[in-house]
Image (cartoon, rainbow, N blue to C red):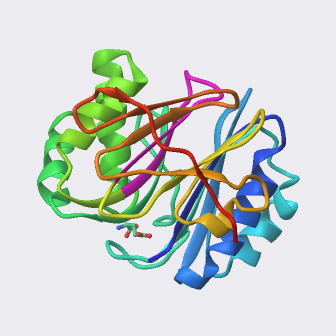
Amino acid sequence: MCGIVGYAGNNQAAPILLDGLAKLEYRGYDSAGVCVHNENGLNAVKAKGRLTVLSDRIDGGNALQGMVGIGHTRWATHGAPSDVNSHPHLSWTGKIAVVHNGIIENEAKLRQKMLRKGATFCSETDTEVVANMVGYYYEKLGNFVDAVRETVLRLEGSFALGIMCVDVPGKVIAVKKDSPLIFGFGKGENFVASDVPAILKYTQTVAYLEDGDMAIFDSDSVTFMDASGEIVEKKQEKITW
Ligand code: GLU
C-alpha cells in the first residue's frame, strides 16, 4: 500500500499534492516525492522518510511553482527506501515523469530490453523501467497517449500510474491495473488519487477507474479510455460521507 495524487488546475499543485499525500498516510509508506511541471520543465523533488522531510525540502510546496503535478508515497518493493529510489522517476530522455503504486512482475526482462535500446537507469526500481519505456515509445511514436498505451500493454503485474510529459504541459495521464485509482472532477481543476480522502476537500464528485482504464486530463477536461483504447464515459458518483 502507499499512495498517488495527481493534479491539474488553476492553483499551485505542490501544496495540494502534499495535502493529498498526507491524507493517504494511513496506507503506509517509507518515502515520498512530487513532480511539478512548469516553464522550466519537469521538477521532481523526493525524500526518504516522513512526508514532513519532503515538505520541509520544498517549503510546504511553496518552493515548487506550477499548476500541474503528480505526487507519491512509496512502499518499497524493488530497491531499498532511499532518495534515489523514491518516486517520481524520470525517463533517461528527461521527458517523462512517473509515479507508480504496485509491482511490475516482468521488470527484469523489460529492463534488459530497455538497456538494449540505450536507456540508462539510476535507481533499482521497477518503476524506472516504466518511465524509460514511456520515454522510449514517446521518442518512437511522438505521441504521449500512444506511448503510455504501448507501455501499459507490455506490463505484467499491478500498477496505478500517474505520468507527465515535458512536451505536453498541463496534462496528466493516469492508468491502473490491480491497484486502486479514482478520478476527481473539479471546477477548473481535476484530480486523481489512490483513495477518496486525498481529494475530498476539493471535490465530492468522483469516478472509480477499472482495470485497464486510462484517464487523460488537464484542468478543464478528461478523456477516459478502456483497456482496448476505446473512449468511454465513466459514471460520476457523489461522495456523501
Ligand atoms: N514497486 C515500486 C517501488 O518499489 C512501487 C512501490 C509502491 O507501490 O510504492 O518503487
Residue 118 visible in the picture: no
Of residues 22 and 105, the one drawn nearer to the viewer in this rendering: 22
Q: Is residue 175 magenta?
A: yes
Ligand number 1: quarter of image? bottom left
Residue 22 to residue 186: above or below = below
Using residue 224 as the reference point, say whether residue 148 is left or right of it: left
Q: Nearer the viewer, residue 131 or 212?
A: 212
Residue 220: where, in percent of width, then height? 69, 27
Q: Which image quarter: residue 195? A: bottom right
The x, y position of residue 240, in whole percent, is 69, 65
**Would residue 238 appear left or right of 94 to someone viewing this image?**
right
Residue at left offset 50%, top offset 64%: 84
Quadrant for residue 72, please give it. Answer: bottom right
Q: Main secondary structure of the magenta part?
A: strand
**The residue stretch that appears in magenta:** 160-176
Where residue 183 appears, as percent x and y from the top left, is 55, 49
Figure quadrant of the N terminus: bottom left
Q: Nearer the viewer, residue 113 or 98?
A: 98
Q: Nearer the viewer, residue 179 or 202?
A: 202
**Residue 106, located in which quarter of the rendered image?**
bottom left
Does the segment drawn in magenta span residue 117? no
Q: Could you tell me which residue is drawn at 39 percent across and 18 percent down? A: 143
